[in-house]
Image (spheres, rainbow, N blue to C red):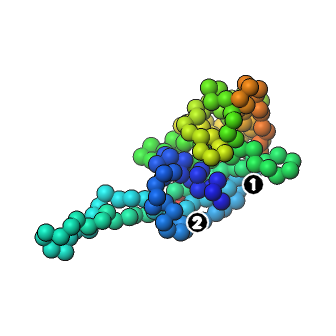
Amino acid sequence: MQSKQVMLSAIGGLALLGTPHASAQKPSVTTETYGNWTYRCAQVASPSDQVDAPAASGETPAKPKDSTTMVCETSQVLQDADRNVIAQIAFGNVPATPGKLVIVFQVPQGTLLSSPVRFGTEGLKDSLEAEYVTCYQQICLARAETEAETIRKFGQSENGTLEFADRSGRKISVLLSFDGMSAANERLISGN
């Protein structure tokens, strides 16, 4: 469960990761499954700049009001044969930029941070790169932005590849299914 909260925070621009208010309220969550992909929305608390007006002059200023934000993602958890999590991929909308997606990759700590994560069609014939932004407990997060159209093209393939390097520089390539990725991302993009 903590992994999902970290990914949702990362999709939200990594801003909620350190926000103490984010766990103060129980989020309202909706989940839909599309093939091997999950569309998930959670209502999370976020601090607001608005403050309550003081009841009378001379009183101490009121505390800021907290507001909630609905954060949605499309994700897939990649597991090995023993069902151990290898990595996770999550897509989210870029606020105020229609047609643009942010992609966050969660990989194990101990990866070579100078080598970007690569993601694309099987064998990485068509791919994009994501630079690492932070490591947190036992995971590292890489982030990239791309056009929704690029992901639509990837979705025309049956399978994809996620590649990253371990600390010795050895490439680790993980095959993943694109089954349901297009439908889940269309749900994300449309917001309906």
First of labels 2, 1 by sequence position: 2
Q: Is the residue 11 above or below the residue 117 in the image?
A: below
Q: Is the residue 21 above or below the residue 54 in the image?
A: above
Residue receiving disc 2: 29
Q: Is residue 24 left or right of residue 183?
A: left
Q: Residue at x 67, y 39 (%)?
A: 109
Q: Residue at x 78, y 37 (%)?
A: 174
Whether residue 82 is visible: yes
Q: Secondary structure at mark 2?
A: strand
Q: Secondary structure at mark 1?
A: loop
Q: Is residue 145 left or right of residue 96?
A: right
The percent position of residue 192, horizontal first and vertical second, equals 54, 60
User: Label 1: few (<14), some or many (≥20) within 10 Å?
Assistant: some
Q: Which mark is residue 145?
A: none
Residue 171 placement: quadrant? top right
User: Please, what is the three-letter code of the amino acid marked with disc 2?
Assistant: Val
Residue receiving disc 1: 35
The percent position of residue 88, horizontal first and vertical second, equals 68, 46
